[in-house]
Amino acid sequence: MKVQLMDPGDDTELGDDDPPFAEDVAADLHLHYLWDAMSGGDPFLRAVARAALLRPLADPGTIRYRQEALADCLRHPATIAELYDIAVDAVTIRRSLFLLPVHGHPDLELSTAVRMLTELADRLDRLRRVRAPVTGGFASPAFRRFFAMIEQELDDAFMARLRRTLRELSFPQGLLTSAGIGPGGEVVSQILRRPREENRRLFDRTPMRRPVFSFTLPDRDEAGANALARLRDRSVNDVANAATQSVDHVLAFFTALRTELAFYLACGNAVNALHTLGAPTCTPDPWAADATVAIGLYDPCLALRTGRAPVGNSVDLHSDLLVITGANRGGKSTLLRSLGTAQLMMQAGMPAPARDLAMRPVGQVYTHWAREEDAELRRGKLDEELGRMGRIIAVIRPGDLLLCNESFSATNEAEGSQLLLDVTRALVDAGVRVHSVTHLYEFARAVERIPTLRPDFLRAPRTDAADHRFRLVPGPALITSFGLDVYDQVFGGHDATAAVHRPTSGHGSAGCRCNSGDPDPEPGARA
């Protein structure tokens, strides 16, 4: 039996091994806020949510398959919770029965397997009872296939045969086996036999029908008891192996059911948490060929951290290269996180943090954020950035997405611009999508002059109007990032307006290099 609620081709194995740079992606995008909301306090749900989000699907058909299954789960939360409880109960049976693994003793293995299968049969019956009243209310291919499988493979005839076989394997009338005698009186050719119906009647087992040959072991005949136990083990060895494999098969089914339902429960928790804050979600379109079009896109992790719905942005991107520039604390890093998180959520089959969203799937998502200075002073910031970028380039593939936030900002304007330009151009030419937040004006102007890159530009405007704060607009880079505005807000007494329009010399303006990390305690949040 296969669950296949997350993938139409097979059961989903999320595994324990993280993809490369998973911890960096999680930290840079603040994904732990999202995972906490998805978990609802359950560590298992959090682990499933983490694994699913860090392993994006590349096939739009599979993404749509999950989206439709999730829609069913959101319409029938009580049924999904009941199915999940059955699965959890099934995978913990061994612990509830205080059964320990038994190896090398076929008779004990068979006894343990029969007890396990008897309990698992009860859980299968519970699944059948859930299926009966709800099948008409589920519309997704995933759940329609699942309930049809339950109906076909666990019908009344199968369940009756299963319970009859389990009663036989408990040997209520003793074990019946046949054997031959080999050279030297050795017992050979032992075969476990199923008693015939006529052998179960009283008069067919009396001496009036045929002679009965038997022997009785003396009370203290330990050697004889051990020999008989070995004969019994040899008789049931094949059946014990088959029964143990059956237990493993049924437990694997319930384990997969628990994992896949846990994903949908976690998605439901996230949706409820965001809707409680007034933050909208939508079902994204994964079939967008060459564009990312979003209306009201926001950072869900920011919403969950601040407890309020952030300002949304609308974007219309058609290039593999996006360059985001503009005013300090204007929401640039927040938009970058919004795009990265929405990409991962969409490719996990989750609702997206926007009013409407269409995105093209990517392979893996990588991040290259500016880091704090090494506290141990073993290497400089630029050295660390170059080394980390080199490790990313070693594993990144065409079709992947790289999010850069102030990359190579640890050096001067000219050198940082040239480094970022060389890396960006090589990656885009190789088929990698790059979204970059930068204050490097020379870099922004350089990519604008390279026709093969065809970059999209977004800019954080310099405005104090509440309606436009943190709303980015299309536009090429300006020579200033208005860093003196931040200076005025913090220290006061400086005419930022005059300063930013003052003629400058060298590379960029005085405000261009003021902020290398776009610090914003609540970027994009509503005032």
Image (cartoon, helix red, strand yellow):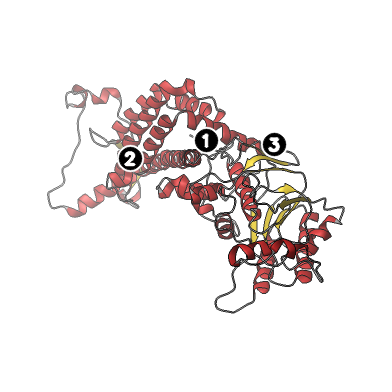
Is tag 1's residue or tag 2's residue first in the polypeptide sequence?
A: 1
Residue 501 appears left or right of 396: right
Binning the other alpha carbons within 10 Å of mark 1 as few (below 14), some (14 to 19) or many (20 upward) gives many
Residue type, numbered disc 2: Met
Q: Position of residue 200 (x, y in %)?
A: 24, 25
Residue 207 lies, with reference to residue 239, above or below; the image says above
For label 1, the SS is: loop
Q: Which residue lies furthest to the left in this view?
A: 219
Residue type, numbered disc 1: Leu
Q: Where is residue 428 in the image (x, y as percent from the top left)?
A: 78, 55
What number is the disc on residue 61? none
Q: Distance between the residues labelled 2 and 3?
A: 46 Å
Q: Position of residue 414 (x, y in %)?
A: 79, 70
Instruction: Name the residue that disc number 2 marks.
Output: 116
| Residue located at (18% from left, 54% from top) | 222
Instruction: Name the residue that disc number 1 marks.
Output: 5
Q: Which of 443 and 19 is in front in this view?
A: 443
Q: Nearer the viewer, mark 2 or mark 3?
A: 3
Question: Would you say the residues marked 1 and 3 are in contact, meaning their CB atoms lie under 8 Å apart?
Answer: no
Is tag 2's residue or tag 3's residue first in the polypeptide sequence?
A: 2
What number is the disc on residue 287? 3
